[in-house]
Image (spheres, rainbow, N blue to C red):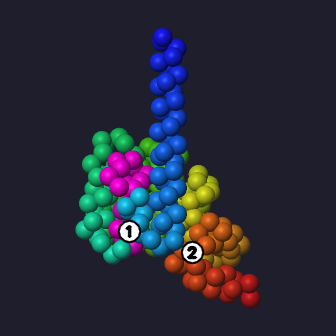
């Protein structure tokens, strides 16, 4: 009986994991195509931190800073030692124009959750706001290394590397971005930069 219960529990856990992966995948596909409201709808009322982070980013793309602040605030309210709490606090600080505070919180997120791609990406965004493009590029690179299928980790890495004159890395990240997000609103901008690099 105990063995059957364990097997059932594992099956439920595996099913939940597949459903979560599908939910993140669906939301990212909508986000990648510029359908930000659709991404938010796909996330629904999920409290999963990766989905909340994407919902906050979607609200920013829709130019709804108050909604973005509310969503990131849900992450920020997590317990003090939870790296996602620091990710949320960094995002809230960035929305408030506090680049230094955003960097400090993002550094804490990366220190306590080094394998979380969103922590690395948030650190890159904060460092970009603080005009530290070399470290921002390294953070975006780490985010794309941790999650190679995340198109926007490649996009932001490409932008950062273009600012520090690393044409080779700019091109490789932008090519990955176009492959992963062929309908992205930034497609024209990225193709234009790639054409400039090939001259």
Label disc, if present, on residue 37 of the rendered structure: 1
| Quadrant of image for the C terminus | bottom right
Q: Residue at x 66, y 69 (%)?
A: 179
Disc with the residue nearer the chain's start (2 vs 1): 1
Q: Is residue 76 one of those drawn in magenta?
A: no
- The region drawn magenta spans 43-61
Pointer 2 residue? 183
Q: Residue at x 57, y 83 (%)?
A: 189
State the image coordinates of residue 17 (x, y, percent, origin top left). Answer: 50, 40
Residue 67's image quarter? bottom left
| Vertical side of 9 occupied by 151: above or below | below
> Magenta-highlighted stretch: main secondary structure?
helix
Tag 2: Cα neighbours inside 10 Å, few (<14), some, or many (≥20)?
Answer: some
Tell which of 57 and 145 is nearer to you.
57
Residue 194's image quarter? bottom right
Tell which of 152 and 101 is nearer to you.
152
Tell which of 51 and 75 is nearer to you.
51
Q: CA distance from mark 2 to mark 1?
A: 16 Å
Q: Is residue 59 one of those drawn in magenta?
A: yes
State the image coordinates of residue 109 (x, y, percent, origin top left). Answer: 42, 50
State the image coordinates of residue 103 (x, y, percent, origin top left). Answer: 40, 60
Q: In the drawing, does residue 166 fall left or right of residue 27?
A: right
Q: Is residue 87 visible?
A: no
Q: Residue at x 43, y 52 (%)?
A: 50
Q: Is residue 188 visible?
A: yes
| Vertical side of 79 occupied by 181: above or below | below
Determine whether label 2 and label 1 are within 8 Å by CB: no
């Amino acid at each position: 009986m105990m063995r059957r219960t364990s097997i059932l529990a594992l099956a439920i856990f595996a099913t939940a994991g597949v459903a979560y992966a599908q939910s993140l995948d669906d939301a990212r596909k909508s986000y990648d195509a510029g359908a930000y409201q659709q991404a938010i709808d796909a996330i629904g009322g999920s409290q999963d931190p990766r989905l909340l982070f994407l919902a906050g980013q979607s609200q920013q793309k829709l130019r709804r800073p108050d909604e973005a602040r509310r969503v990131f605030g849900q992450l920020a309210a997590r317990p003090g030692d939870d790296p996602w709490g620091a990710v949320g606090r960094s995002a809230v600080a960035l929305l408030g124009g506090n680049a230094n505070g955003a960097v400090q919180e993002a550094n804490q997120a990366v220190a306590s959750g080094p394998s979380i791609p969103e922590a690395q990406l948030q650190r890159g965004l904060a460092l970009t706001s603080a005009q530290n493009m070399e470290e921002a590029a390294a953070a975006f690179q780490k985010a794309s290394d941790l999650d190679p299928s995340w198109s926007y980790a490649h996009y932001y890495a490409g932008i950062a590397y273009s600012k520090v004159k690393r044409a080779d890395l700019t091109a490789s990240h932008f090519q990955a971005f176009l492959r992963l997000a062929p309908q992205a609103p930034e497609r024209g901008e990225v193709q234009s930069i790639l054409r400039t690099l090939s001259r």
